[in-house]
Image (cartoon, helix red, strand yellow):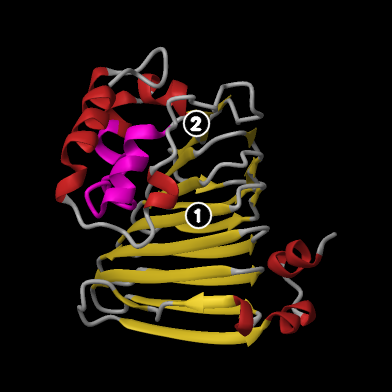
């Protein structure tokens, strides 16, 4: 298989090749042909897409195409290894083989960011992938507002790796013209960390939203609030262990439009989880970022 990016480290090329060779051995994913039959060899992503490019005291941000070379060791260890698992199923393996664009964000010093880190790329991609790495002890708010103008089925992934005792709010309000979008937001959390997801997901066609976090140790918390409009399927899973570790899921949605899998612990281990479901109209009464985003014209 040929490289997707012109300059690509050897480890990534080999990892892509391995994903192609081994994917038939992995579990199949329901209706995966919607996404896997589309070839990304036309690699629609490019660097001129309003990606962040920052190198400051606390923050490094680069297009993923550049980051796989400049932060090669860090991404070799973490790309689709701890949050989105490339060996989980054939769909994930296919995605790894065809990643064509994405954003890399690295908050690498202890401290609190003065304002949200916002990235809002405008791209045309069937396999975009963002990697966000938060070092131990960091307090941060990160907002993703991607616009994807492809008409082809698209797999859009963001994986977030949170260090010990870090406290992070991640917000997503992406827009896509794809008629079949698979939107994955997965996380890995070290002990003592808190991660809040605030996700506004609109669907113009059919959409699947796949949420997951692995809570690695005591006193780690994952709290998700999601607002869903349009015809969507929601998958929400969690893994973890440790005293004081727990996860919550709050949904605002039109019950008739949502096909929902139960919120559960993926591996079946004992873990405190809870779920609340509300009508979408109830969100309008909340004074929150999510309410402002989902009601905006």
The answer for how far apart the CA atoms under marks 2 and 1 are is 15 Å
Q: Are marks 2 and 1 in contact (CB under 8 Å)?
A: no
Q: Which residue is mark 1?
A: 183
Find residue 14 and report its image quarter.
Answer: top left
For this view, does 2 lie left or right of residue 261?
left
Q: Residue furthest top?
A: 6
**Which residue corresponds to the image point at 31% horizontal and 63% vertical from the top-left?**
214
Q: Which region shows up in magenta?
A: 76-99
Query: Which of 5/274 is in front?
Result: 5
Up the image or down, 285 lies above or below 135; here it is below
Neighbours of disc 2 within 10 Å: few (<14), some (14-19), many (20+): many
Q: Quadrant of residue 273?
A: bottom left
Kindly identify which residue carries mark 2. 101
Mark earlier in primary sequence (2, 1): 2
Instruction: Give percent across and percent down for residue 15.
Output: 23, 31
User: On the rendered image, what quadrant is the C terminus found in?
Assistant: bottom right
């Amino acid at each position: 298989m040929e490289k997707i990016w012109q300059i690509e480290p050897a480890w990534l090329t080999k990892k892509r090749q391995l994903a192609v060779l081994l994917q038939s051995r992995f579990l199949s994913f329901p209706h995966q042909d919607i996404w896997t039959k589309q070839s990304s060899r036309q690699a629609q992503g490019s660097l001129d897409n309003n990606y962040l490019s920052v190198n400051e005291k606390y923050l490094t941000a680069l297009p993923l195409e550049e980051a796989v070379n400049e932060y090669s060791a860090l991404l070799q260890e973490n790309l689709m290894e701890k949050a989105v698992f490339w060996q989980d199923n054939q769909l994930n393996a296919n995605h790894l083989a065809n990643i064509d664009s994405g954003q890399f964000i690295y908050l690498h010093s202890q401290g609190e960011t003065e304002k949200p880190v916002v990235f809002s790329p405008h791209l045309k991609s069937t396999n975009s992938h963002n990697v966000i790495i938060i070092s131990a002890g960091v307090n941060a708010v990160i907002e993703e507002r991607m616009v994807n103008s492809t008409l082809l089925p698209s797999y859009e992934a963001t994986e977030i790796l949170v260090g010990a005792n870090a406290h992070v709010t991640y917000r997503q309000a992406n827009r896509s013209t794809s008629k079949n979008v698979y939107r994955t937001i997965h996380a890995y959390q070290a002990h003592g960390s808190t991660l809040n997801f605030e996700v506004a997901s609109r669907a113009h066609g059919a959409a699947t939203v796949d949420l997951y976090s692995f809570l690695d140790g005591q006193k780690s918390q994952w709290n998700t609030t999601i607002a869903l409009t349009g015809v969507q399927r929601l998958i929400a899973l969690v893994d973890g262990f440790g005293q004081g570790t727990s996860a919550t899921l709050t949904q605002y949605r039109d019950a008739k439009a949502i096909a929902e899998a139960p919120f559960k612990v993926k591996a079946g281990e004992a873990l405190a989880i809870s779920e609340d479901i509300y009508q979408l109209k109830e969100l309008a009464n909340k004074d929150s970022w999510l309410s402002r985003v989902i009601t905006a014209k």
